[in-house]
Image (cartoon, rainbow, N blue to C red):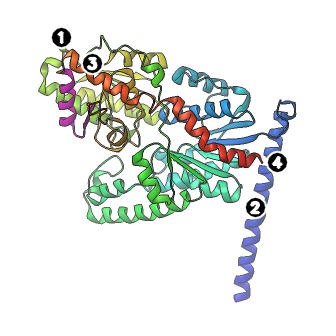
């Protein structure tokens, strides 16, 4: 019996080894064909170029994470001539030219198409949240390994750079495909704050009412979160270099992964936005955020309802307040959320004070940033809050959620002067918004100036480009030897 079991075990290992070898050979062949098609021998450089693979399945989304991706690529293109950037994306409904056109339109970032390539992935459905109505974190994380395997098999890079937070792909990239692994972490997939919310039985977008009301279900979810956190920490430990976008994110990632991550603040378009005039602002509140659940647009609408209830004169006439929701719609789920928000506007009787700007161009975004008085942000524990920086650079006064990056890194005093306001509940947001509209012109302008000076330089694109180029330098030089 023992011999039979041992024979089965050996046979199983042999099958695994054979399959692995076939996949490895196929990956090597795909890489060879890539260089042959590239005809790099005709290039100025005689040495074979390095390939940096950016794992970013939603590269065409147009959010802050995408700005990090495209600015990273531009900084590499500027500093390293013998490097090819490859983006792994599941945006199969667009072409390379269409993606680059949107990058230029949305971010005003011009990229060199000659050493930038795209590997289009067909298995992105494995990381869609709708696929996992329960155990979503684990489902998406395990699903990311399927998508990561497709990417690495189609083209294996020298340096695998995850810019979306799919840590479960790191062991695959490093151990199976032999890549150096880097990560730019926008936020931890699991955090002690999420665990605390379940322990305190508080409902939220990632802790529904049914679980929050049950001690047994809450205890089960706590166990699930702890197991997942352990697996997440193991996966993250396979990274060779880790960058994070804020003090808040660094605290969580260092604790979970056992690393000493480097804070690289996301690139913000402070240079062009600081050119916008501070004067002639309208009674407009702008919210710039993708229509995702965690952005909590419902809180924004509830806050506006509270504001209009407290100040009926803000509904119409010369003191009328307008809330403009600007965001990208990526798919049907986003479209459904937008429709529900519009229905909520009617339910709350605020539809005459709310405007939706869906998939707005960069020029349209700048228009609203140049006209509005307040920039609204309501995401709980936002990892950084790039849009809050953009508000401040553009001359808006931010009213942001009192947590995460906005609280720890952005809406902080500058030379002991106020730069914005923080809030948590609809009532608090309504009060802070009313405070801003009650400021005299001189008081308002002083806060504008403080906010703008606070973000100039600290969160600029040039600072980001220099930081990321310097941090990647040792790995790129090591791979080039």
Are the residues at dot 1 and dot 3 in contact (C-beta closer than 8 Å)? Answer: no
Q: Position of residue 397 (x, y in %)?
A: 30, 25
Distance from Cα at disc 1 to Cα at disc 2? 71 Å
Please give the name of the residue rendered at 79% of the width and 45% of the height, measured from the top-left corner. 30
* 375 or 264: nearer the viewer: 264
Q: Which residues are magenta?
A: 420-437
Residue picked out by circle 2: 19
Residue sitting at 26 percent across and 31 percent down? 418
Q: Residue at x 26, y 21 (%)?
A: 446
**In magenta segment, residue 317:** no
| Mark before the other along the chain sequence, 3 or 4 | 4
Q: Is residue 218 visible?
A: yes
Q: Residues within 10 Å of mark 1 (few under 14, many from 20)?
A: few
- Label count reads 4
Q: Which residue is mark 3?
A: 445
Disc 4: which residue: 29
What crowding class fits label 4: few (fewer than 14 Cα within 10 Å), some (14-19), or many (20 or more)?
A: some
Q: Nearer the viewer, mark 3 or mark 2?
A: 3
Q: Is residue 431 above or below residue 223?
A: above
User: Of callouts 4 and 2, which one flags the residue occurring earlier in the amino acid sequence?
Assistant: 2
């Amino acid at each position: 019996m023992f011999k039979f079991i041992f024979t089965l075990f050996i046979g199983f290992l042999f099958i695994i080894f054979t399959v692995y070898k076939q996949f490895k050979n196929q990956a090597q062949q795909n890489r060879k064909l890539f260089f042959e098609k590239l005809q790099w021998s005709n290039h100025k450089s005689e040495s074979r170029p390095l390939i940096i693979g950016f794992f970013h399945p939603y590269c065409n989304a147009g959010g802050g994470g995408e700005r990090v991706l495209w600015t990273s690529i531009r900084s590499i293109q500027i500093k390293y001539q013998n490097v090819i950037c490859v983006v792994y994306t599941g945006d199969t409904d667009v072409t390379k030219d269409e993606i680059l056109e949107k990058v230029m339109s949305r971010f005003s970032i011009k990229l060199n198409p000659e050493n930038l390539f795209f590997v289009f992935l067909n298995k992105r459905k494995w990381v869609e949240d709708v696929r996992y109505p329960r155990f979503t974190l684990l489902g998406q994380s395990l699903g990311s390994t399927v998508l990561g395997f497709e990417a690495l098999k189609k083209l294996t890079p020298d340096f695998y750079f995850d810019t979306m937070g799919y840590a479960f792909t790191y062991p695959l990239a490093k151990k199976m495909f032999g890549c150096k692994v880097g990560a730019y972490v926008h936020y931890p997939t699991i955090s002690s704050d999420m665990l605390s919310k379940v322990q305190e039985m508080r409902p939220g977008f990632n802790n529904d009412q049914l679980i929050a009301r049950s001690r047994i279900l809450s205890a089960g979810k706590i166990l699930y979160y702890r197991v997942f956190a352990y697996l997440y920490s193991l996966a993250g430990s396979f990274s060779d270099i880790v960058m994070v976008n804020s003090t808040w994110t660094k605290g969580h990632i260092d604790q979970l992964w056992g690393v000493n991550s480097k804070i690289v603040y996301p690139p913000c378009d402070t240079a062009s936005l600081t050119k916008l005039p501070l004067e002639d602002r309208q009674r407009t509140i702008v919210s710039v955020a993708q229509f995702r659940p965690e952005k909590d647009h419902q809180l924004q609408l509830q806050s506006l309802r509270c504001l209009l209830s407290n100040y009926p004169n803000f509904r119409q006439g010369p003191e009328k307040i307008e809330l403009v929701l600007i965001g990208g719609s990526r798919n049907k789920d986003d479209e459904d959320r937008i429709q529900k928000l519009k229905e909520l506007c009617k339910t709350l009787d605020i539809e005459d004070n709310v405007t939706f700007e869906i998939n707005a161009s960069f020029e349209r975004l700048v228009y609203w940033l140049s006209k509005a008085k307040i920039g609204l942000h309501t995401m709980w524990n936002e990892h950084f809050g790039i849009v809050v920086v953009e508000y401040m650079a553009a001359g808006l006064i931010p009213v942001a959620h009192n947590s995460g990056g906005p609280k720890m890194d952005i809406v902080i005093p500058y030379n002991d002067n106020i730069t914005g306001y923080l809030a948590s509940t609809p009532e608090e947001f309504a009060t802070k918004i009313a405070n801003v509209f009650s400021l005299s012109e001189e008081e308002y302008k002083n806060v504008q100036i403080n906010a703008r000076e606070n973000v100039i330089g600290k969160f600029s694109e040039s600072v980001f480009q220099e930081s990321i180029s310097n941090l990647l330098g040792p790995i790129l030089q090591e791979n080039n030897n």
